[in-house]
Image (cartoon, rainbow, N blue to C red):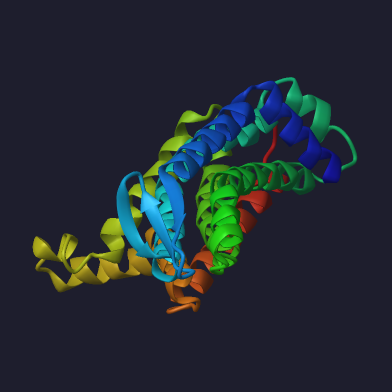
Protein backbone atom coordinates (compact mmCIF):
# COMPACT_ATOMS: atom_id res chain seq x y z
CA UNK A 1 0.00 0.00 0.00
CA UNK A 2 2.90 2.35 0.74
CA UNK A 3 4.25 1.87 -2.78
CA UNK A 4 0.83 2.71 -4.25
CA UNK A 5 0.56 5.76 -2.00
CA UNK A 6 3.95 7.09 -3.09
CA UNK A 7 3.19 6.29 -6.71
CA UNK A 8 -0.04 8.29 -6.54
CA UNK A 9 1.89 11.34 -5.31
CA UNK A 10 4.45 10.95 -8.09
CA UNK A 11 1.62 10.66 -10.60
CA UNK A 12 0.03 13.86 -9.26
CA UNK A 13 3.31 15.71 -9.80
CA UNK A 14 3.81 14.16 -13.26
CA UNK A 15 0.33 15.27 -14.28
CA UNK A 16 1.12 18.77 -12.95
CA UNK A 17 -2.02 18.83 -10.77
CA UNK A 18 0.07 18.79 -7.59
CA UNK A 19 2.23 21.61 -8.92
CA UNK A 20 -0.88 23.67 -9.73
CA UNK A 21 -2.30 23.18 -6.23
CA UNK A 22 1.02 23.97 -4.58
CA UNK A 23 1.40 27.04 -6.78
CA UNK A 24 -2.07 28.28 -5.82
CA UNK A 25 -1.34 27.64 -2.12
CA UNK A 26 1.95 29.54 -2.28
CA UNK A 27 0.32 32.41 -4.18
CA UNK A 28 -2.42 32.69 -1.54
CA UNK A 29 0.20 32.56 1.20
CA UNK A 30 2.26 35.33 -0.42
CA UNK A 31 -0.82 37.52 -0.93
CA UNK A 32 -2.00 37.06 2.65
CA UNK A 33 1.44 37.84 4.05
CA UNK A 34 1.83 40.89 1.82
CA UNK A 35 -1.50 42.37 2.96
CA UNK A 36 -0.94 41.81 6.68
CA UNK A 37 1.49 44.04 8.60
CA UNK A 38 2.38 44.36 12.26
CA UNK A 39 2.97 47.82 13.71
CA UNK A 40 4.63 48.04 17.14
CA UNK A 41 4.26 51.04 19.45
CA UNK A 42 6.68 52.24 22.16
CA UNK A 43 4.36 51.03 24.93
CA UNK A 44 4.76 47.46 23.66
CA UNK A 45 1.36 47.25 21.96
CA UNK A 46 1.22 45.45 18.61
CA UNK A 47 -1.46 46.51 16.11
CA UNK A 48 -2.29 44.41 13.07
CA UNK A 49 -2.89 46.18 9.76
CA UNK A 50 -4.61 44.80 6.68
CA UNK A 51 -3.27 47.07 3.99
CA UNK A 52 -3.82 50.54 5.47
CA UNK A 53 -6.75 49.50 7.67
CA UNK A 54 -6.13 48.79 11.34
CA UNK A 55 -7.65 45.57 12.65
CA UNK A 56 -6.92 46.37 16.28
CA UNK A 57 -4.65 44.86 18.92
CA UNK A 58 -2.85 41.64 18.08
CA UNK A 59 -4.69 39.67 20.78
CA UNK A 60 -7.98 39.97 18.89
CA UNK A 61 -6.80 40.62 15.33
CA UNK A 62 -4.48 37.61 14.95
CA UNK A 63 -7.18 34.94 15.59
CA UNK A 64 -9.54 36.88 13.33
CA UNK A 65 -7.05 36.93 10.43
CA UNK A 66 -6.12 33.26 10.80
CA UNK A 67 -9.81 32.35 10.98
CA UNK A 68 -10.63 34.28 7.80
CA UNK A 69 -7.71 32.68 5.96
CA UNK A 70 -8.77 29.20 7.09
CA UNK A 71 -12.39 29.83 6.10
CA UNK A 72 -11.38 31.11 2.66
CA UNK A 73 -9.25 28.05 2.01
CA UNK A 74 -11.88 25.72 3.42
CA UNK A 75 -14.25 27.01 0.76
CA UNK A 76 -11.83 27.24 -2.17
CA UNK A 77 -9.45 24.31 -1.82
CA UNK A 78 -11.89 21.35 -1.61
CA UNK A 79 -13.22 22.05 -5.10
CA UNK A 80 -9.73 22.47 -6.56
CA UNK A 81 -8.41 19.40 -4.77
CA UNK A 82 -11.33 17.22 -5.92
CA UNK A 83 -10.47 18.05 -9.53
CA UNK A 84 -6.90 16.97 -8.76
CA UNK A 85 -7.60 13.89 -6.61
CA UNK A 86 -10.52 12.30 -8.49
CA UNK A 87 -8.35 11.45 -11.56
CA UNK A 88 -5.93 9.66 -9.21
CA UNK A 89 -8.75 7.28 -8.26
CA UNK A 90 -10.26 6.99 -11.75
CA UNK A 91 -6.89 6.18 -13.34
CA UNK A 92 -6.65 3.09 -11.12
CA UNK A 93 -9.43 1.51 -13.19
CA UNK A 94 -8.09 2.60 -16.58
CA UNK A 95 -7.07 0.02 -19.14
CA UNK A 96 -3.37 -0.69 -18.84
CA UNK A 97 -3.04 0.48 -15.24
CA UNK A 98 -5.77 -1.97 -14.26
CA UNK A 99 -4.12 -5.06 -15.75
CA UNK A 100 -0.71 -4.04 -14.43
CA UNK A 101 -1.69 -3.63 -10.79
CA UNK A 102 -4.72 -5.80 -10.08
CA UNK A 103 -3.06 -8.86 -11.59
CA UNK A 104 -0.44 -8.81 -8.82
CA UNK A 105 -0.77 -10.39 -5.40
CA UNK A 106 -1.50 -7.12 -3.58
CA UNK A 107 -5.17 -6.90 -2.53
CA UNK A 108 -7.21 -4.47 -4.61
CA UNK A 109 -8.36 -2.47 -1.62
CA UNK A 110 -4.77 -1.70 -0.60
CA UNK A 111 -3.99 -0.32 -4.05
CA UNK A 112 -7.14 1.80 -4.15
CA UNK A 113 -6.82 2.95 -0.54
CA UNK A 114 -3.21 3.96 -1.11
CA UNK A 115 -4.27 6.26 -3.92
CA UNK A 116 -7.12 7.56 -1.76
CA UNK A 117 -4.60 8.52 0.92
CA UNK A 118 -2.51 10.22 -1.75
CA UNK A 119 -5.42 12.50 -2.64
CA UNK A 120 -6.06 13.32 1.03
CA UNK A 121 -2.36 14.11 1.54
CA UNK A 122 -2.38 16.41 -1.45
CA UNK A 123 -5.22 18.44 0.07
CA UNK A 124 -3.68 18.58 3.55
CA UNK A 125 -0.30 19.75 2.26
CA UNK A 126 -1.93 22.41 0.10
CA UNK A 127 -3.95 23.75 3.04
CA UNK A 128 -0.86 23.72 5.26
CA UNK A 129 1.26 25.57 2.70
CA UNK A 130 -1.37 28.28 2.35
CA UNK A 131 -2.03 28.88 6.06
CA UNK A 132 1.07 27.92 8.05
CA UNK A 133 3.46 30.69 6.86
CA UNK A 134 1.00 33.43 7.89
CA UNK A 135 0.11 31.72 11.18
CA UNK A 136 3.78 31.20 12.05
CA UNK A 137 4.73 34.76 11.15
CA UNK A 138 1.92 36.23 13.25
CA UNK A 139 2.91 34.08 16.22
CA UNK A 140 6.61 34.98 15.79
CA UNK A 141 5.94 38.72 15.67
CA UNK A 142 3.14 39.04 18.23
CA UNK A 143 3.47 35.92 20.44
CA UNK A 144 -0.29 35.39 20.07
CA UNK A 145 -0.95 31.65 19.84
CA UNK A 146 -1.89 30.36 16.38
CA UNK A 147 -1.52 26.58 16.95
CA UNK A 148 -5.29 26.28 16.48
CA UNK A 149 -4.70 26.27 12.74
CA UNK A 150 -3.47 22.65 13.06
CA UNK A 151 -6.85 21.58 14.46
CA UNK A 152 -8.53 23.57 11.69
CA UNK A 153 -6.40 21.62 9.19
CA UNK A 154 -7.63 18.31 10.65
CA UNK A 155 -11.28 19.42 10.55
CA UNK A 156 -11.06 20.72 6.99
CA UNK A 157 -9.27 17.55 5.90
CA UNK A 158 -12.06 15.43 7.40
CA UNK A 159 -14.58 17.30 5.27
CA UNK A 160 -12.48 16.79 2.16
CA UNK A 161 -11.92 13.09 2.90
CA UNK A 162 -15.71 12.65 3.02
CA UNK A 163 -15.98 14.19 -0.45
CA UNK A 164 -13.14 11.99 -1.69
CA UNK A 165 -14.92 8.90 -0.35
CA UNK A 166 -17.96 9.85 -2.45
CA UNK A 167 -15.67 10.23 -5.48
CA UNK A 168 -14.17 6.79 -4.79
CA UNK A 169 -17.61 5.17 -4.71
CA UNK A 170 -18.74 7.01 -7.86
CA UNK A 171 -15.61 5.84 -9.70
CA UNK A 172 -16.62 2.17 -9.66
CA UNK A 173 -19.79 2.04 -11.84
CA UNK A 174 -18.12 3.60 -14.90
CA UNK A 175 -14.84 4.87 -16.28
CA UNK A 176 -13.84 8.51 -16.32
CA UNK A 177 -13.73 11.35 -13.83
CA UNK A 178 -16.95 13.21 -14.68
CA UNK A 179 -19.27 11.31 -12.31
CA UNK A 180 -16.87 11.27 -9.30
CA UNK A 181 -16.27 15.02 -9.60
CA UNK A 182 -19.96 15.85 -10.07
CA UNK A 183 -20.99 13.65 -7.13
CA UNK A 184 -18.41 15.23 -4.81
CA UNK A 185 -19.25 18.78 -5.88
CA UNK A 186 -22.97 18.08 -5.39
CA UNK A 187 -22.37 16.83 -1.84
CA UNK A 188 -20.26 19.91 -1.11
CA UNK A 189 -22.81 22.28 -2.68
CA UNK A 190 -25.81 20.90 -0.74
CA UNK A 191 -23.94 20.76 2.56
CA UNK A 192 -24.65 24.38 3.50
CA UNK A 193 -28.35 24.48 2.44
CA UNK A 194 -28.99 21.25 4.37
CA UNK A 195 -27.32 22.67 7.48
CA UNK A 196 -29.60 25.72 7.21
CA UNK A 197 -32.64 23.75 6.00
CA UNK A 198 -35.01 25.68 8.31
CA UNK A 199 -34.37 28.84 6.29
CA UNK A 200 -33.88 27.16 2.90
CA UNK A 201 -35.88 24.02 2.09
CA UNK A 202 -38.45 24.39 4.87
CA UNK A 203 -39.57 27.68 3.33
CA UNK A 204 -41.28 25.83 0.49
CA UNK A 205 -41.67 22.30 1.94
CA UNK A 206 -44.83 22.16 4.04
CA UNK A 207 -45.24 18.39 3.99
CA UNK A 208 -44.18 16.56 7.16
CA UNK A 209 -42.90 13.65 5.05
CA UNK A 210 -40.79 15.92 2.84
CA UNK A 211 -39.27 17.65 5.86
CA UNK A 212 -38.62 14.28 7.51
CA UNK A 213 -36.81 13.15 4.35
CA UNK A 214 -34.69 16.33 4.23
CA UNK A 215 -33.81 15.84 7.91
CA UNK A 216 -32.57 12.32 7.27
CA UNK A 217 -30.58 13.42 4.21
CA UNK A 218 -28.93 16.04 6.42
CA UNK A 219 -28.15 13.45 9.12
CA UNK A 220 -26.60 11.03 6.61
CA UNK A 221 -24.62 13.41 4.40
CA UNK A 222 -21.24 14.81 5.52
CA UNK A 223 -21.29 18.18 7.31
CA UNK A 224 -18.66 19.99 5.21
CA UNK A 225 -19.97 23.51 5.81
CA UNK A 226 -20.37 22.86 9.53
CA UNK A 227 -16.83 21.54 9.79
CA UNK A 228 -15.65 24.75 8.14
CA UNK A 229 -17.62 26.79 10.69
CA UNK A 230 -16.32 24.58 13.48
CA UNK A 231 -12.70 25.16 12.45
CA UNK A 232 -13.32 28.93 12.37
CA UNK A 233 -14.88 28.78 15.83
CA UNK A 234 -11.97 26.76 17.20
CA UNK A 235 -9.43 29.28 15.91
CA UNK A 236 -11.36 32.08 17.57
CA UNK A 237 -12.25 30.44 20.90
CA UNK A 238 -9.92 27.44 21.25
CA UNK A 239 -12.54 24.76 21.89
CA UNK A 240 -14.90 22.47 19.98
CA UNK A 241 -18.45 23.81 20.23
CA UNK A 242 -20.15 20.68 18.82
CA UNK A 243 -18.90 17.15 18.11
CA UNK A 244 -21.91 16.21 15.97
CA UNK A 245 -20.41 17.33 12.60
CA UNK A 246 -17.16 15.49 13.39
CA UNK A 247 -18.43 12.05 14.35
CA UNK A 248 -21.32 12.01 11.85
CA UNK A 249 -18.97 12.95 8.99
CA UNK A 250 -16.47 10.36 10.21
CA UNK A 251 -19.10 7.60 10.20
CA UNK A 252 -20.26 8.64 6.71
CA UNK A 253 -16.68 8.56 5.40
CA UNK A 254 -15.88 5.14 6.86
CA UNK A 255 -19.18 3.67 5.62
CA UNK A 256 -18.91 5.03 2.06
CA UNK A 257 -15.22 4.20 1.71
CA UNK A 258 -15.80 0.72 3.13
CA UNK A 259 -18.63 0.19 0.63
CA UNK A 260 -16.39 1.35 -2.22
CA UNK A 261 -13.54 -0.97 -1.23
CA UNK A 262 -15.95 -3.88 -0.78
CA UNK A 263 -17.49 -3.32 -4.22
CA UNK A 264 -14.02 -3.06 -5.73
CA UNK A 265 -13.02 -6.48 -4.37
CA UNK A 266 -16.18 -8.06 -5.83
CA UNK A 267 -16.08 -6.24 -9.16
CA UNK A 268 -15.06 -8.25 -12.23
CA UNK A 269 -12.84 -6.53 -14.79
Q: Which of 3 and 19 is in front in this view?
A: 19
Residue at (46%, 36%) from the top-left corner?
Answer: 181
Residue at (72%, 27%) from the top-left corner?
Answer: 11
Whether residue 255 is situated above or below residue 34 in the rendered picture: below
Q: In this view, does 145 lie to the left or right of 236?
A: right
Horizontal and vertical percent position of residue 247: 53, 73
Q: Nearer the viewer, residue 18 or 216?
A: 18
Whether residue 12 is situated above or below residue 191 in the rendered picture: above
Q: Is residue 219 left or right of residue 165?
A: left
| Quarter residue 213 falls in | bottom left
| Quarter residue 200 falls in | bottom left
Whether residue 182 is situated above or below residue 15 in the rendered picture: below
Horizontal and vertical percent position of residue 16: 63, 23
Horizontal and vertical percent position of residue 134: 54, 50
Residue 22 visible from this viewpoint:
yes
Residue at (55%, 44%) from the top-left corner?
Answer: 130
Whether residue 109 is situated above or below residue 25 in the rendered picture: below
Residue 222 visible from this viewpoint:
no
Q: Which of 176 and 128 is in front in this view?
A: 128
Amino acid sequence: MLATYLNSLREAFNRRVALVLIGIALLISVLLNSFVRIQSFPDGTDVVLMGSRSLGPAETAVPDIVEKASSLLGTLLPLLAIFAAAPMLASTLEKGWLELTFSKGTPRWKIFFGRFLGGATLYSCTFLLATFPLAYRLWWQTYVSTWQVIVALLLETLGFVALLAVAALATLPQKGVALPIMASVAIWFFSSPLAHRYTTYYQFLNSYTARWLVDWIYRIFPKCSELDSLSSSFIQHGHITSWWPIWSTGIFTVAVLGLALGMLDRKSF
